[in-house]
Amino acid sequence: MKYLVVVGDGMADYPLEELGGKTPLEEANTPNMDYIAKKGATGMMRTIPKGMDAGSDIANLAILGYDPRRVYTGRGPLEAASIGVELGPGDVAFRCNLITVENGKIADFTAGHVSSEEAKALLSALNEAEIAPFGKFYPGVSYRNLFVCSFGEELRSTPPHDIVGESIDDYLLKPRQNESAAKLNEVMLRSGKVLTEHEVNLKRVEQGKRPANMVWLWGQGRKPELEPFSDKYGVEGAVISAVDLIRGIACLAGMRVVHVPGATGYYDTDYAAKAEYALKALESADYCYIHVEAPDEAGHEGSVEMKIKTIEDLDEKLIGRLLDNLNDDTAIAVLPDHPTPIRVKTHTSEPVPFAVLSPRLRGDSVENFSERACSAGSLGLMEATRLNQLLLA
């Protein structure tokens, strides 16, 4: 048997008035996901354990079979693993967003999707300016970068995508009177002067683009320990994603990271290439986990049109190509990692629909792949940590 898991990040949503009470999944034309749901078994999956934040880090750990309540330490160390930053026992890794601040408020948590090349130049300038002599900035992909120092693990931080339009002063690291928080908050505030005057941002402003005029530190933690995926499940696993976070989980779990040219983590990602590389990966691996970020980006931007388009692109260009090339001894599962509803523009923790097409499972004959349809599926409500047990049973 071979196994495929396709995750449409943030794909689940709420019913929307502008769609006549449908969700984007219900409105989108998704014949391939519908086929998996009709011929396979369906249900709802709890990807966020009760009491934990609705983050992609927690959700994807759970889907891959790792209990976040036991292994999760923070988002930063997962991304550090992806970009090859080796954390020592005393190191704390922070996710470092490049953001756009206007009038003291977060205007864009992606800084206009600043390019990776621009981000590298900006972070290099921050290191050269020594605004944080006790730590170091590391470039990642686009606005998603890293900062490593030796303290701050205990502080309370806020993801910038949750506070777009809010005053930065209200959401700096807390408790504010803590010495570690004071030092790191000063780094964030001081970054503004260096970045605003940098040639990269001067050029972006000239071009009508949003400047990356501040860094935002959050999601900190120390290096976690994950049981190797092959030991846990007895199969060799591969992961395809353009997002450092997902690649980092793969690295820590001893899974092979498959790099796909044209995979961007945004609307322009090459869905078809991801499918081709997944099929190629299955020639030597037993299990391939394919993560697509685009629907989540549309949810954060509050764009109904783009969310529907990214769902349809995922269905046609990626899942359709997989189904056309799979044989009878391959199982495929499809699901979101969490909802990113258009109405709230951030992650929520409600259970998500999932469908599994496998020769080992009896089908449900549901009408389509959606929140409403899968809620009546035969698999009921399942914890995400059980998905691989179901697939590999």
Image (cartoon, grey):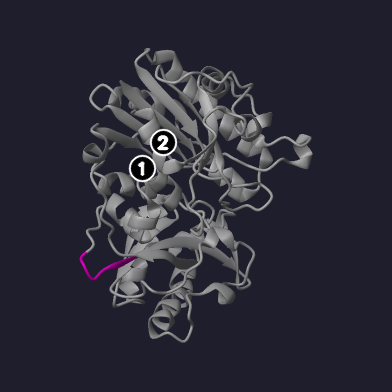
Give the labeled residue for mark 2. 387
The magenta segment: 88-93
- Residue 392 coordinates in the image, percent (x, y): 33, 28
Q: Is residue 176 magenta?
A: no
Above or below, 8 against 29 in this view is below
| Viewer-proximal residue among 106 and 388 | 388
**Mark 1 or mark 2, earlier in chain:** 1
Q: Is the residue under label 2 in contact with that under label 1 (CB below 8 Å)?
A: yes
| Viewer-proximal residue among 284 and 41 | 41
Q: Quadrant of residue 274?
A: top left
Drawn side of residue 321 relative to residue 146, left or right? right
Question: Which amino acid type corresponds to the residue marked 2 in the rendered image?
Answer: Leu
Above or below, 244 against 212 in this view is above
- Residue 285 coordinates in the image, percent (x, y): 25, 28
Q: Quadrant of residue 255?
A: top left
Label 1 sits on a secondary structure element that is: loop
Q: Quadrant of residue 138?
A: bottom left
Give the labeled residue for mark 1. 65
- Residue 330 coordinates in the image, percent (x, y): 36, 19
Magenta stretch, main secondary structure, is loop
| Viewer-proximal residue among 124 and 147 | 147
Q: Residue at x 64, y 21 (%)?
A: 367
On-image quarter of the N terminus: top left
On-image quarter of the C terminus: top left
